[in-house]
Image (cartoon, rainbow, N blue to C red):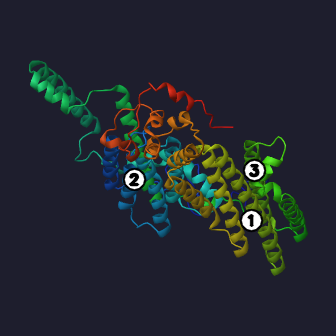
Amino acid sequence: MPPYPGQPATPPLIGPALPRQGEPGWTVWSRRVWPIAPLASSPRRVLASALTAGLIGTAVWRLSVLSVGHLVVGLLVFGVVYGTAPRRPSRSEWFGIGLTLALLAVPALLAAEWLGALCLVAAWIVGWCTLVGGRTWTAVFTGPFLPWVLPARVSGWVRRGLPNRVGVANPGRIATVIGLTVVLAVVFGALFASADAAFAHFVGNLVPAFDGGEAIARAVVFGIVVMFVSGGAYLVRFPPRLDAMAPAPMQPVPRWEWALPLGVLDALFIAFVAVQATVLFGGHTHVLETEGLTYAEYARQGFWQLLWVSALTLLVLSVAIRVAGRVSAADRLVLRILVGVLCATSVVVVVSAIHRMWLYQQAYGFSTERLMVITTEVWLGAVFVLVAIAGIRMTGRWLPRAVLVAGVLALLGLAALNPERLIADRNIDRFEQTGALDAEYLSGLSSDIDPALHRLPESVRECVTARVHDPDSWYTFNLSRARADRPTSGDRPEYCSAYWSYPQYR
């Protein structure tokens, strides 16, 4: 009974009360999504391995240089994370690790900065999605952002794993001793070096020159690698359930409410593909017979058409699949037919846009932007095929990961083609046919094109110069830069002006 009339009775507590803010175990995350273990501590082997990996990463990794260091750090992180984990990687994790390392290998092999940057971004996404897990779109979109909130959790986990002061020196005293040792070595080393030239030469070769900016960069790299290892080790032991944040399934609506819009859209797509067949696949004849239509306009029209159609179609499909009822066999049959027709006609638009861009490149030469357009179109076409397969099987739990893998495979396929060398080869083919060469554009490409330049006459090859860069150290090794043999002098012969005035873009 209430203590006095009008006061509600306090409901009895069932189980322990949840921790409040500031208490052990409190977290901003829902306990359903990512509960915290307030007494868990990191194993000593994880701490030691993280520090070791940080020191190795500091020696071999430079954030701003495309080199083998990215691959080495990736191997270190995955090796330590799963080498110290209480379990072995699953088959899906092995696959994700393989894709991540393949992406990290591209900066060690090719020198194209734009391609290396894309591969590093993709490696970040795939790597963290591998560690985080999850199958829904929510997990795929939120997983790559999880590292930014990991320090709040990992710091306490690591701090509880540090040795206590019983039998171990105070960390402050350790820092004092190390600092005193460094000061003594620097002072007495400087005195000995000033007293003897041979000893000064020996010390100069042994100890690298101090660079404040370089020291800060190495300290940042050390912190990043340690965070990668400790964060990955934490996620393997305490993974979040990001799938729990996915929106709940919507209440199915009557069949006519979703079938009518999809049916009208299918009819519109079919009519467009049928009526515009000449526009979509007219090629050279259509361009030449259409007044005022250039190859640039022809290709851009197809590209923007692809982007708008793809984005809007995927949006419509995502909404229709969420609200469509699939209880009866008739509902499933109608949904399969309507979604299949929409995906098939969208693939036709993708093929037409690829065809247009291919004609554009045949007319004006290849470029990095045009190859990226084609790669994006191929990936979007694969997405429509995957959506159609999911519609046939009436299950899409595998679809988010499949779309991500398709994008990674498209990017790796582009890297396997060595895109800048392909661009150089195609433009040199055009030079052999027409005598026109955009040496200025080729000079702006990386050393990936150097093997292709041997096809040019020596006099013309001198017109394609390279950007000057310092020789690579062993830890910044890049295969393409190591094989580079293009002249870097800015003094070009006078006849090169003809090859520097040809415009690559129309």
Residue 249 is tagged as 1
Asked which secondary structure carries label 1, the reply is loop
Looking at the rendered structure, the kind of residue marked 2 is Val
| Circles 2, 1 touching at the beta carbon (< 8 Å) | no
In-front residue for pair 375/262: 375
Q: Quadrant of residue 251?
A: bottom right
Q: Earlier in the sequence, mark 3 or mark 2?
A: 2
Q: What whole-number distance in Å separates the C-alpha atoms at marks 3 and 1?
A: 36 Å
Please state if 436 lies on the left or on the right of 247 as rendered: left
Residue 77 is tagged as 2
Disc 2 versus disc 1: nearer the observer = 2
Query: Which residue is drawn at the image coordinates 82% and 60% (left, top)?
Result: 277
Q: Is residue 38 above or below residue 462?
A: below
- Residue position for label 3: 302
Residue 375 is tagged as none
Q: Earlier in the sequence, mark 2 or mark 1?
A: 2
Q: Is residue 389 above or below residue 127?
A: below
Q: Quadrant of residue 180?
A: top left
